Amino acid sequence: MVRSLPEEKKNKWPSLLPELTYIYNNTPHSSTGHTPFYLMFGREGRLPIDLTFGLNDNQTETSTSDWVINHGRRLHDAHQLAEREMNKASQVQKHNFDKKAKAKQLCRGERVLLQRRDFKGRHKVKDHWYPTPYIVVEQINPDIPVYKVRPESGSGDEKIVHRNRLKPCTIDFTTDEVAEPTNEPCLTRGRGHPSNRNPHLGATSYPGT
């Protein structure tokens, strides 16, 4: 959540933690089906709009003992549901991970985003990706997922990086348009030779996802 803040507010992130924590605790999680607040207290948290309009939590218990019994039931039901939803979510996450574990081969001339590794500590709230795309120059070895890339702008050094730091880029930053993806395979000439699908390194080639 902190990383999603606008760049000009990221250096003030400590002052925003109370609001971000409040939002996080009162937002349903896809993995559990409930908000963290509900799983902890057995009821939904009161939001500012509830106080503004004088809304109550619709609890109808007439005695302390009734409240304790119903509260225990709500917590039990919530935890049972959360466990089922988390099991489902773990299967979905495993499926998605397995798909990405065999990432699509990148071709010469394709536009990609490069993951940043140049910040630590307090700077970890910065964006995970460099703001400008890179161009794939070549795959160093067809049997190893390591690529040489260069900045699309032409300003900067070439880098040799692993495939897991590269993400296909289908956005034209000059128009904010998203190009249609392609599922064409890379045409390789054999060991040590780059693809010839796009012989012009400066040309735009939009990869599939």
Image (cartoon, grey):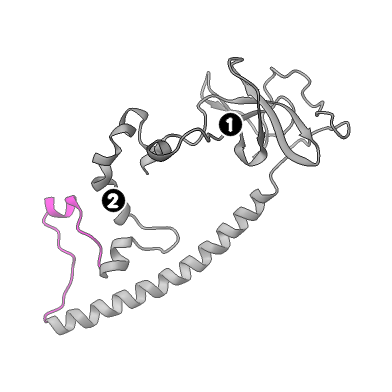
Cβ atoms under marks 1 and 2 closer than 8 Å? no
Mark number, residue 21: 2
* Residue at horizontal 19 percent and vertical 58 percent from the top: 46
Residue sitting farthest toward the top: 154
Q: Residues within 10 Å of mark 1 (few under 14, many from 20)?
A: many
In magenta stretch: residue 51: yes
Cα–Cα gap, marks 1 and 2: 30 Å
Residue found 80% across the figure and 35% down from its top: 141
Q: State which region is magenta.
A: 43-63
In what quadrant of the picture does the N terminus appear? Answer: top left
Residue 101, compared with residue 132, is above or below; it is below
**Residue 95 placed where, x, y %?**
62, 58
Residue 172's x, y, as percent?
A: 57, 23
Residue type at numbered disc 1: Leu
Q: Please indicate whether residue 113 sits to the left or right of residue 39 in the image.
A: right
Give the left or right position of residue 13, taking residue 163 as reference: left
14 or 206, nearer to the observer? 14
Looking at the rendering, in which quadrant would you find the C terminus? top right
Query: Which amino acid type is marked by label 2?
Result: Thr
Element type at marker 1? strand
Q: Which residue is mark 1?
A: 113
Q: Left or right: where does residue 166 sit relative to residue 52?
A: right
- x, y percent for residue 124: 42, 39
Q: Is residue 165 magenta?
A: no
Residue 49 sits above or below residue 78 on the image: above
What element does badge 2 sit on?
A: helix
| Residue occupying the point 67% across, 22% down | 204
Q: At 29% across and 67% down in the image, what residue appears? A: 40
